[in-house]
Image (cartoon, rainbow, N blue to C red):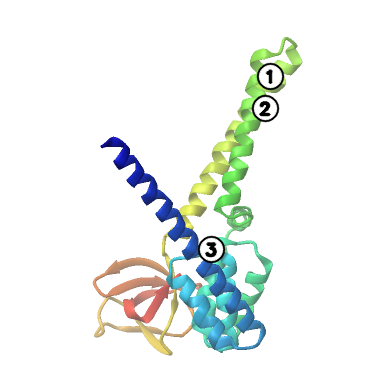
Amino acid sequence: MKSKYLSFGFVLFVLIIWVSNANASMLENKILQANSYYTSAKYDSAAALYQSVVDAGYESSGLYYNLGNAYFKLREMPLAILYFEKAKKLAPADEDILKNLEVANTLLVDKIEKMPELFFKNWWNAFYNLFNAEAWAWISIWLLLISLTSVFFYITSSRLWLRKTGFFSAILFSILTIVSFGLASQRYYYTKQVNEAIIFVPTITVKSSPGSSSVDLFVLHEGTKVRLMDEVVGWNKIKIANGSIGWLPNDSFKGI
């Protein structure tokens, strides 16, 4: 009886692996076909195929970037900016993504000046965005290995200078390991949470409170990026780059 269950489990495992590989191969073929469509200037067909891969649950900075480019060629700016922003979340230092996102933003109606930030916050953001979550995770692993190596030299070495070097190196690299691991965790959490969005209606008035009868504050247009701050039924409190705050209905934007 046990061997029968084991055989069934093995067959089920092989079947799951086979289905997963088949799905991966199918998605890869769709991406290759979409690339071909894009090269041939068939941007609508390329966008449809890229979108089908995204809808299937696959994500990567390259896929989002290509989809953003296809929508940009179709002059669908809100969708182009949405997927450039999604690509930026996964690859924050990619120059091509940043450049195309900047170009797309210049075509928007709203020209919102960003609030100046303190210099040390700009430095921290630049450092934080140097790598994605996976890269920070690998850095933390290498730093941990160096820390353990330093501890090994501290414990095993008979020479005083080598023991001192191992001791202080272990402390330094342990601190760096904790910092890099924290950055990896934070970046991973940031890529999974939805705290920013893109406006997807041509024109909308931001309200002073969650309700259509509340006071009008200012007007936003499609493609503008907002920060999501709080939510009540059907409404979300938002903040734009210049610091202005108000409320928008949830069906007026799509989360990044």
Q: Amino acid at mark 2?
A: Ser
Image quarter of the N terminus: top left
Q: Amino acid at mark 3?
A: Lys
56 left or right of 187 in image = left
Residues tagged 2 and 1 counted as in contact (Cβ below 8 A):
yes
Q: Residues within 10 Å of mark 2 (few under 14, many from 20)?
A: many
SS type, badge 1? helix
Q: Of the residues tagged 2 and 1, which is closer to the observer?
A: 1
Q: What label does residue 102 carry, if any?
A: none
Picture quadrant where residue 115 is located: bottom right
Residue at figure coordinates x 56%, y 41% from the top left: 179
User: Mark 2 or mark 1, which has the lower sequence index?
Assistant: 1
Please provide percent x and percent y for residue 3.
32, 37
Please provide percent x and percent y for residue 234.
26, 75
Please name the residue that numbered disc 3 is placed on: 89
Q: Nearer the viewer, residue 254 or 237?
A: 254
Residue 101 against residue 178 in the figure, above or below:
below
Please name the residue that numbered disc 1 is placed on: 153
Label 3, label 2: how far apart the Cα atoms are? 33 Å
Please name the residue that numbered disc 2 is placed on: 169
SS type, badge 2? helix
Q: Nearer the viewer, residue 256 or 4?
A: 4
Residue 162 against residue 215 in the figure, above or below:
above
**Extreme-top residue of the structure:** 158
Please provide percent x and percent y for residue 11.
38, 49
Label 2, label 1: how far apart the Cα atoms are? 10 Å
Picture quadrant where residue 236 is located: bottom left
Label 1, label 3: how far apart the Cα atoms are? 40 Å
Residue at figure coordinates x 66%, y 17% from the top left: 154
Residue 56 against residue 8 in the figure, above or below:
below
